[in-house]
Image (cartoon, grey):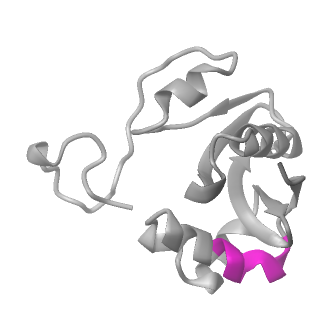
Amino acid sequence: MATVDVRPFEEADARAVARLATAVQWPSLTDPEVVRRVCTAPGAHASVAVTGGEVVGWAQVLSDGVLQAHLSFLAVHPDHRRRGIARLLVLATFQAAGAKRMDLITDSAEEFYESFAHRRMTGYRIYPGLDPDPDSGPGGEQD
């Protein structure tokens, strides 16, 4: 298996992360300028996983730097999954955030997140200005 390097996001990574977002079908992050802004926002800590010179994974955490962090994004290219890359990204971004705890939401990776020391909690994703649609299910179809 090829070596994976996990390192802090650099602005030059924005185009590669946007391509990754396209591969994992995240339409809100397919514009490199949006990716750059998300990764360099105040309180944001982002990391990329690189193998063979290619960005194959990305994670972004928002943190107050003291107590609380929120894992906002975690993506690994489908061709590179089940190799420990996601776990490395979670640990790297959590460490960079400098917080004591990290919250997240997921609608498809419960088994992965349960493999970390955790306490399960209930949460909500709020979309101000969006009319509630009880037929849309958890999270609806929003990005």
Is residue 113 left or right of 93 when viewed as pictured?
Answer: left
In the rendered image of this protein, does residue 99 appear above or below residue 143? above
The quadrant where residue 118 appears: top right
In the rendered image of this protein, does residue 57 appear above or below residue 95? below
- Residue 110 lies in the magenta stretch: no
Q: Is residue 127 visible?
A: yes
The quadrant where residue 102 appears: top right
| Image quadrant where one finds the C terminus | bottom left
Is residue 69 left or right of 142 when viewed as pictured?
Answer: right
The residue shown at (59%, 79%) is 34
Q: Is residue 41 visible?
A: no
Is residue 97 left or right of 59 when viewed as pictured?
Answer: right
The residue shown at (42%, 30%) is 123
Q: Position of residue 36 (x, y in %)?
A: 70, 77
The main secondary structure of the magenta stretch is helix
Q: Position of residue 90 (x, y in %)?
A: 73, 40
Q: Position of residue 72 (x, y in %)?
A: 59, 50
Please tell me which residue lies in front, 26 or 138: 26
Q: Position of residue 62 (x, y in %)?
A: 69, 50
Please tell me which residue lies in front, 82 or 110: 82
In the rendered image of this protein, does residue 95 appear above or below residue 1? above
Over which residues does the magenta segment extend? Answer: 10-17
Is residue 93 left or right of 112 when viewed as pictured?
Answer: right
